[in-house]
Amino acid sequence: MAAGDRGLVHLTRRREVPGRLRLSMSTDLGGLSQLRAAVPEDALCLSVLAMQVFLDTYATTGIRPSIAREVLSSYSQAEFRAAIASVGSRVMLAEVRDHLVGFARVTLRATHHLAPPGVQAELLRLYVHWLSHEPTRRLSQPSRHGTASAQ
């Protein structure tokens, strides 16, 4: 992928059966990136990425006990292994050059009193690493935390 190119993900809503929507996903990522379903071996990296994104977002003034407890309980490897194994959810990964840069967790057959009748799904989490917001930055360039290279 050239330095100025941007990888794009396109989600398309299509009506195939009256009253039901099907989402299809296509990628234009130049062969350097992929979207895929998570497997149990991804739990370690999912856990660390989730903690990093959460702390970058919500702990901007430092860590206090309530935030530490939330992070360690909600984003543990065990929590991600359980989510991946659950028949009631899906975890999808976004990778760039074999580095995890984001994930989405969807709860299937979700219910809520404000949702319309019928089968629903809920986007429970959508986490994206800050580096992936800068498509021209290469993973081997210095980052705000030092060197981001992990080759």
Image (cartoon, grey):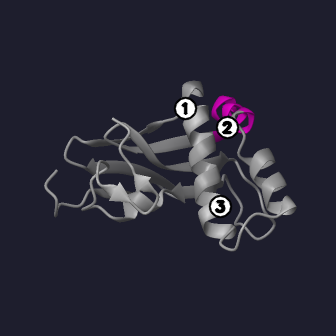
The amino acid type found where label 2 is placed reads: Phe
Q: Residue at x 62, y 68 (%)?
A: 57
Gap between marks 1 and 3, in whole Å? 20 Å
Q: Position of residue 40 (x, y in %)?
A: 60, 26
Residue farthest toward the top in the current orientation of the protein: 41
Q: Position of residue 47 (x, y in %)?
A: 63, 42
- Tell me if label 2 and label 3 are in contact, CB under 8 Å: no
Taking depth in this image into account, of 108 and 42 the one nearest to the observer is: 42
Quickly name the residue at label 3. 55
- The picture quadrant where one finds residue 42 is top right
The first of marks 1 and 3 along the sequence is 1
- Tell me if label 2 and label 1 are in contact, CB under 8 Å: yes
- Tell me if label 1 and label 3 are in contact, CB under 8 Å: no
Compared with 20, 34 (above or below) is above
Residue segment shown in magenta: 78-89
Q: Which mark is residue 42?
A: 1
Q: Position of residue 51 (x, y in %)?
A: 64, 51
Q: Which mark is residue 101?
A: none
